[in-house]
Image (cartoon, helix red, strand yellow):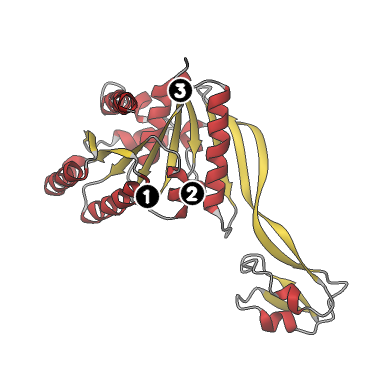
Amino acid sequence: MRNRLKEIVVISGKGGTGKTSIAASFAILGGEDVVLADCDVDAADMHLLMAPEILLEEAFFSGAIAKIDPALCTGCGLCDEACRFDAINEQDGKYVIDPLNCEGCGYCPRVCPENAISMLDANVGDWYKSKTRMGTPMVHAKLGVGADNSGKLVSKVKEEAKQLAKTEERPFLLVDGPPGVGCPVVASLAGADYVVIVIEPTVSGIHDLKRVQELIAKFRINSGCIINKFDINHEVTSDIKAFIADAGIDHIADIPYDTAFTEAMTIGRTIVEHSPDGIGKYLSESWVKIKQLIQLESEKI
């Protein structure tokens, strides 16, 4: 009997912790066992390391946006008076919609006496199925400028990636989640089997860790912590270790500060490719440990 698909989500309390670099390294290490999903749709940058070849591209529609038919608009201005988002402006005696300000509330069509305003499905971005430079399947997306509903776009990316992993019978869905604790993060966590938290030992970092842990606890998902640049502040690193021990979070690895992280990014490579016998070995060991932890949890079920 084939093992059930395991979903691993890599997140952080804020951007800039090395989350995406670490997730990309896991994708390299996972090889043919992995389908990769970049769910950081607000600031997608996994492609910089994975160099994906796009095989399928589709527009993503979510919510609504108003549109005024200039042939029917008489310039009465009732829509402008009703709008509370400054999304309607006068131009040459007619009124037009500013798409960046329109919230899609649907109130302006109700007050238009000429039925000149309609509500259209809003194109908030695009999503893609791709093949990375290593041949790994990758599902990713790009949210439009000023667009909303990134949580729904994250759900779409995960849904497509999960289906692809099942179709190709790959044992792991590896998700690069968004930073923070907002709606996109909630969407990325839904259905996860294990969460990897990447953190740096700073005062704000431990605060972010506590917020992330509180969110993960609500989902009742097992989690582990990678402390990146652990040696830049040994006191805070000790505080982090004490916190994760009390919270029941697995301690996966301490990764020392190394300029190889930056060097790898500048040449478009992962740490495990650029420095396999140096700092990359910490991530290789981390990937092995994560798979072992997931297997142990599966045996308890």
Q: Is residue 30 above or below residue 23?
A: above
Picture disc at residue 15: 1
Front label number (1 vs 3): 3
Q: CA distance from mark 1 to mark 3?
A: 28 Å
The amino acid sitting under disc 2 is Ala
- Report which residue position mark 2 lands on: 43
In this rendering, position of residue 256 left or right of residue 297? left
Extreme-right residue of the structure:
71
Dividing the picture into quarters, in which one does residue 85 lie?
Answer: bottom right
Mark 2 surroundings: few (<14), some (14-19) or many (≥20) residues within 10 A = some
Q: Position of residue 284 (x, y in %)?
A: 30, 24
Q: Going from the N terminus, do you reach mark 3 or mark 2 first?
A: 2
Residue 271: give its label.
none
Camera-side mark, 3 or 2 = 3
Q: Earlier in the sequence, mark 2 or mark 1?
A: 1
- 234 versus 258 height, above or below: below
User: Which residue does the numbered mark 3 point to in the structure image?
Assistant: 171
Amino acid on which the number 1 mark rests in the picture: Gly
- Cα separation between marks 3 and 2: 27 Å
